[in-house]
């Protein structure tokens, strides 16, 4: 969201924000590169293989990379429908999500622009929703490719 905000000079236009956010997903020059997406989704998926089992990390990782990675986004989204995924994603792009943990000074959302030299952003509802829709559509596209 920050990369999109900067690229668009803070534009609050939903379509512009959606299109730029979607364009930047997977771009290695920005913070949501494909390597980052793979690392995050794979880490979550390996964690779920470990959760509640007696498997060790090495065994779960070996199992995942022998075959499980081929359905990484199906596993990551639990094969949920678009609406369920979108609602979950919105909890992470909506400023209300962070009101309870504002003391952590989450760098995506803060009323002040700079704290201790770190820049913070206050995203609009349009920007938050456009980001959630774009990321959800990206996930839906990845799910289609896995079928």
Image: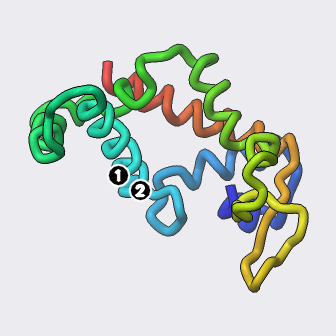
Q: Is residue 59 above or below residue 33?
A: above
Quadrant in the picture for residue 55: top left
Residue at the disc numbered 2: 36
- The residue sitting at 40% across, 53% down in the picture is 34
- The residue sitting at 23% across, 36% down in the picture is 69
Q: Residue 125 at what x, y percent from top left?
A: 86, 41
Q: Nearer the viewer, residue 23 or 77?
A: 77
Coloring scheme used: rainbow
Q: Nearer the viewer, residue 106 or 94?
A: 106
Q: On the rendered structure, is 9 left or right of 25? A: right
Callout 2–callout 1 Cβ contact below 8 Å: yes
The tally of labels here is 2
Q: Is residue 41 above or below residue 102?
A: above
Residue at the disc numbered 1: 39
- The residue sitting at 50% across, 26% down in the picture is 140
Q: On the rendered structure, is 32 left or right of 74? A: right
- Mark number displayed over residue 71: none
Number of residues whose C-alpha sits closer than 10 Å to that of mark 2, classed few (under 14), some (14–19) or many (20 or more): some
Image quadrant holding the C terminus, namely top left
Question: Which element type, helix, strand or loop, lies under badge 1?
Answer: helix
Question: Which element type, helix, strand or loop, lies under badge 2?
Answer: helix
Q: Nearer the viewer, residue 38 or 88?
A: 88
Q: Residue 119 at what x, y percent from top left?
A: 76, 75
Q: On the rendered structure, is 46 left or right of 36? A: left
Image quadrant holding the N terminus, namely bottom right
Q: Is residue 12 above or below residue 78?
A: below
Number of residues whose C-alpha sits closer than 10 Å to that of mark 1, classed few (under 14), some (14–19) or many (20 or more): few
> Mark 2 to mark 1: distance in Å?
5 Å
- The residue sitting at 66% across, 63% down in the picture is 3
Q: Residue 31 at what x, y percent from top left?
A: 53, 63
Quadrant in the picture for residue 133: top right
């Amino acid at each position: 969201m920050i990369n999109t905000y900067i690229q668009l000079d803070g534009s609050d236009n939903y379509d512009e924000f959606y299109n730029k956010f979607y364009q930047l997903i997977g771009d290695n020059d920005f913070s949501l590169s494909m390597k980052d997406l793979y690392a995050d989704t794979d880490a979550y998926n390996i964690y779920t293989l470990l959760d509640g089992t007696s498997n060790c990390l090495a065994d779960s990782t070996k199992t995942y990379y022998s075959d499980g990675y081929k359905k990484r986004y199906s596993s990551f989204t639990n094969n949920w429908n678009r609406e369920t995924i979108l609602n979950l994603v919105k909890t992470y792009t909506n400023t209300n999500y962070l009101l309870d943990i504002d003391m952590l000074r989450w760098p995506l959302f803060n009323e002040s622009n700079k704290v201790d030299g770190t820049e913070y952003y206050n995203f609009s509802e349009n920007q938050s929703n456009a980001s959630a829709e774009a990321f959800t559509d990206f996930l839906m596209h990845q799910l289609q490719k896995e079928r």
